[in-house]
Amino acid sequence: MKQFILAPLLVNALFAFDFNPQMQKYMQQLTQEAKKQNSNFSGFSYSRGEQIFTSKHIGKKGKMITCTSCHGDDLTQNGKNISTGKVIEPLSPSANPKRFTKVKSVKKWLRRNFRDVYTRTGTAQEKGDVITYIVNKK
């Protein structure tokens, strides 16, 4: 019985991150675009976002790379750009409250990082999935 009571609480806690109004609007735009691109779209997914964030690809420099190559596995800690050595502040909004507050910045970094890792632009669903993963990762 306790398992059934706790499970819904865990699911609700998992997606309890509150975006500011600008980011809420951006996430709604991504949702609308994802629905246009895929009629079966039913919402962003933490697990799909995790898969995108951690999967290995031959990046734009011809080497195997993942998002974790620079950002690390613990998103509450600093990362380090593998090409420049520049320190990257934590992605997790719990460790870095500035994250996911400015839509222009979020769009810029999603565009740049998808090109670096996947050598293409991410789809609306992929972007929403990655954001969902990052803001909810514990």
Image (cartoon, rainbow, N blue to C red):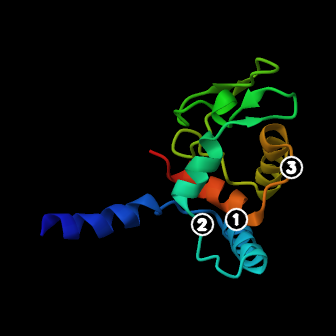
Q: Earlier in the sequence, mark 3 or mark 2?
A: 2
Q: Decide: marks 3, 2 in contact (CB < 8 A)?
A: no
- Tell me, yes or no, if residue 89 can be seen here: no
* Residue furthest to the top: 85
Depicted 76 relative to depicted 105: above or below: above
Residue under label 2, please give it. Answer: 44
| Helix, strand or loop for disc 1 | helix
Foreground: disc 3 or disc 2:
3
Q: Please, what is the three-letter code of the amino acid marked with disc 2? A: Phe
Q: Are marks 2 and 1 in contact (CB under 8 Å)?
A: yes
Secondary structure state at the residue bearing disc 2: loop
Residue to which mark 1 is pinned: 125
Disc 2/disc 1 C-alpha distance (Å): 7 Å
Residue drawn at x 75%, y 65% is 124
Q: Quadrant of residue 5?
A: bottom left
Element under label 3?
loop
Relative to residue 120, is residue 116 depicted above or below? above
Whether 93 is drawn above or below 64: the answer is: below
Q: Residues within 10 Å of mark 1 (few under 14, many from 20)?
A: many
Dot label at residue 120: 3
Residue at 60% from the left image edge and 62% from the top image edge: 19
Q: Quadrant for the N terminus, please.
A: bottom left
Which percent across, then down, holds residue 36?
78, 80
| Residue type pointed to by label 1 | Gln
